[in-house]
Image (cartoon, rainbow, N blue to C red):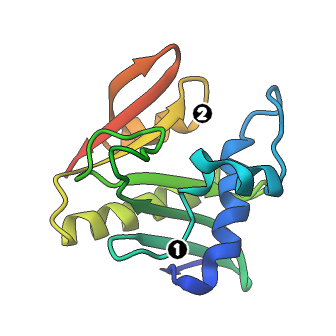
Amino acid sequence: MHLRLADASDLAALERLLLEAVNWSPDQNQLTLQELRDSDTLVRYVEEWPRDDDAGVIAEDDGRVVGAAWFRRFARDRPGFGFLDEFTPEVSVAIAPGCRGRGVGSQLLVALIDIGRERDFEGLSLSVDARNPAVHLYRRLGFVVALDENGSYTMRLQL
């Protein structure tokens, strides 16, 4: 497996991986790719990828995209689920089924955090369901719960 920076050619992979992140739990309704694209709240994580302040890291295994972590800043009038303010980029991360639990997410997030530091951001945020096993990874990397809204965490990492 190797990591590389995400670019405009990765839009379809980011959409597919965002769908994996949204559908993380088999206990909830599973969205289709078209439903994701039709959802103003969800599509804003990938629309017009990449915008000026966007950054992303792609994990590939034998030429196949198996995961990605990316961030972007949101406007106050079109926030993401983990929105803290207009200055803090919000992280999205997803690993393809069958590739989870192998350290891919850790490697992606460490690389993305390094990019955030290089760009002199003060912090990063993300949104995660409290029941999602990824919470443990985020905590291990230094993210702390900034807001708990009925089991939906907004977490922040100070850079």
Percent of width and height locating residue 34:
82, 57
Q: Please state which of residues 3 and 149 is positioned toward the viewer in this rendering.
A: 149
For image coordinates 80% across by 57% down, the residue present is 33
The amino acid sitting under disc 2 is: Pro
For image coordinates 51% across by 62% down, the residue present is 69
Left or right of 70? Residue 139 is: left
Asked whether the beta carbons under mark 1 and mark 2 sit within 8 Å of each other, the answer is no
Residue 62: which quarter of the image?
bottom right
Residue 143, visible in the rendered structure: no
Residue 155: which quarter of the image?
top left
Work out whether 32 lies above or below 112.
Answer: above
* Badge 1 or badge 2: first in the primary sequence: 1
Residue placed under numbered mark 1 in the picture: 49
For image coordinates 79% across by 28% down, the residue present is 28
Q: Please state which of residues 49 and 4 is positioned toward the viewer in this rendering.
A: 49
Find the distance from the CA under tag 1 to the CA under tag 2. Answer: 28 Å
Residue placed under numbered mark 2 in the picture: 133
For image coordinates 51% across by 79% down, the residue present is 6
